[in-house]
Image: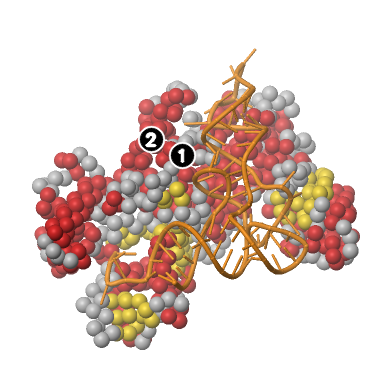
Amino acid sequence: MIALEKKIAEAVSGALQTLFSVSLAAEEVNLQPTRKDFAGTFTFVTFPYTKTLGKGPEQIGNALGEYLKTNVPEVADYNVVKGFLNLVISDETWVGVFGNLFNEQTAETGKREKVVVEYSSPNTNKPLHLGHLRNNFLGYSVAEILKENGKDVVKVNLVNDRGIHICKSMVAYQLLGNGETPELAGIKGDHLAGKYYVAFDKIYKEQIGEMVVQGIEPDKAKKEAPIMQQAQQMLVQWEQGDEEVMNLWRTMNGWVYAGFDETYRTIGVDFDKFYYESETYLLGKDFVAEGLAQGIFFKKPDGSVWVDLKEEGLDEKLVLRADGTSVYITQDLGTAQLKYDDFKYDTSIYVIADEQNYHMQVLKSILQKMGKPYAQGILHLSYGMVDLPSGKMKSREGTVVDADELVAEMVETARQRTDELGKIEGLSELEAQQLYLTLAMGALKYFLLKVDPKKRMLFNPEESINFQGNTGPFIQYTHARIAAIMRKAAELGITAEVNRFENLTNLHETEAEVVALLASYPKVVAEAANLFAPSVIGQYAYDLAKAYNRFYTEVSIFQEINPAALAFRVALSGKVAEKIKNAMRLLGINVPDRM
RNA sequence: GGUCUCGUAGCUCAGCUGGAUAGAGCAACUGCCUUCUAAGCAGUAGGUCUUUGGUUCGAAUCCAAACGGGAUCACCA
């Protein structure tokens, strides 16, 4: 497609020169896709030349069209509507374009750009929820898309395993735990930790309430509530390495990791390296010392350390507390350096919700101010929050959608839907279970990834469960359909090598459309990488599936008598399946052969 | 209040490096399964692209302002 487009652009450039002595480099020729309502594939707009040429737009279009039709073999026909010249590509050309797809080879580039993608990065005090799913799917998919574009990608997970919030669930467990374990309770470890985190909050609120009744100021009550003081005390003990506290911390985190592992496995995301904040939270302090020495940071009278980012359009920012302890940004400065030391990356992507836009801007600005060579490569892949029909998700108000529960519900829906349709007789129980999970994850991932990452989105449970229309299962279904075709073709001994159909001269319009889409795939993958947008891949997969389904219903494959046409259709189907499979893989979605 | 961001069909979203009559899906209605999987296909209906002004041959798209949502401006992470 890219080659074809280039050829047409060159032809238009040549025609402009020959007919009107207009010099327009082929790269400057802007060809746009022809609207569906008109015949043609490429459209050239002639409006811009009416003034300089003193001719009407139709006149220019007709002259160009006629010239191209007679002189360029690829152009079979043309039509002119106002200032739009629509060029129709010949069927032979499409057959050729399709044939070329079989000798595609990926160009080996010498030096591969190193990219670190940090995503997921959960807190170890509660299980994953819907918001995390968007993060996980995005991070995984962007990493895969970049790999597909030849980058050397490392997936990294920075686990937030320490801090006051972790102590909260630990304190509550000490008070109420009574030796409970995930095994005894029969629930996943991350959910068990989450249970105590919630319990903490409940007691905390009760205590504040009582204190306020006793006439204590609410702000003071919040600080002095006994259970909060216990949590703070525990944090100090943790930092001192108190053995009992450390043991409890290791135990509970261990439960949580087991739970996360299970969830990660189910949803199909993975990581090349884990970082733990418990191991990195002190790193930033050296950084602060360096900044002070450089005179970029400054100390306030109370001993706290700040950086002035007013020149950068930001504000003053604290980087170290008066008591010498780290804040959030301190750690991030340290880990940025650590990641660079570990990987010498060209680009470091942070998949983080847009509520942290300011924070990430500050982080990058500080690193730039410090003259860090890797600062320029820092990129915040900022994504919008996921809303529910009932409004915002708030963990404290219990309005979050739990990831494990959601997946389980989707699997159940997939099972029901599949049973109703009754098309998978002959699959083993294990295969059936795998299919349900494949469909459930296909629906869920596609639902979350089809929207532009930057945009805030609404998660409507009823819609996400839909398996029709613009959904993951629709695309998966198209693949399964083609798999059936390929099985039958194999049975009938139909092979689909290029030489079997290369002399074909006639195509159905749906076939040409599918070929055009297939040929544009590399362009789409590149665009998705440039924009860090899996949604671009999703849209493509949907368009391709839709175009194929139209072909499928309008053209019969095995009724075809002409052996070249038959071979072409089988080959076309196989290629579509291949592209669908590949595109979906970039989204982290598997495709079944039967469903 | 400052900064950033979003506003497209009843709902969820595409389209945004300016181009034709603004597209999908869901929901509603109508057709198409004696078999290559109907989780599909075709069609009907549904729009002041928030508003106003500007740039121009041409604006959903670019610029400005207004209105309306959201985020952020912590010695929380």
Chain of the residue under the numbered disc 2 shown in the image: A
Protein chain holding label 1: A
Kindly identify the residue that appears in the image at 49 percent across and 57 percent down.
Answer: A454
Location of residue A398 with respect to A420 vertically, above or below: below
What's the residue at 32%, 76% (across, down)? Answer: A318
Mark 2, other Cα within 10 Å: few <14 / some 14–19 / many ≥20: many
Nearer to me, A54 or A428 = A54
Give the amino acid at mark 2: Val
In this rendering, would A560 be left or right of A222? right
Percent of width and height locating residue B5: 50, 62
Rendered image quadrant of residue A500: top right
- The numbered disc on residue A131 is none
Q: Nearer the viewer, residue A274 or A181?
A: A181
Is any part of residue A390 visible from this angle?
yes
User: Rounded to the nearest whole Å, what is the CA distance between mark 1 and mark 2?
Assistant: 15 Å
Find disc 2 in the rendering and name its residue.
A411
Marks 1 and 2 close (CB-CB < 8 Å):
no
Percent coordinates x, y for residue A234 in the rendering: 15, 63
- Compared with residue A310, is residue A497 higher up or lower down, i.e. above or below? above
SS for dot 2 = helix
User: Which residue is found at the position 49% from the left and 55% from the top?
Assistant: A455
Residue B56 locus on image (x, y percent): 75, 67
> Residue A326, relative to residue A470: is it above or below?
below
The residue pinned by badge 1 equals A463
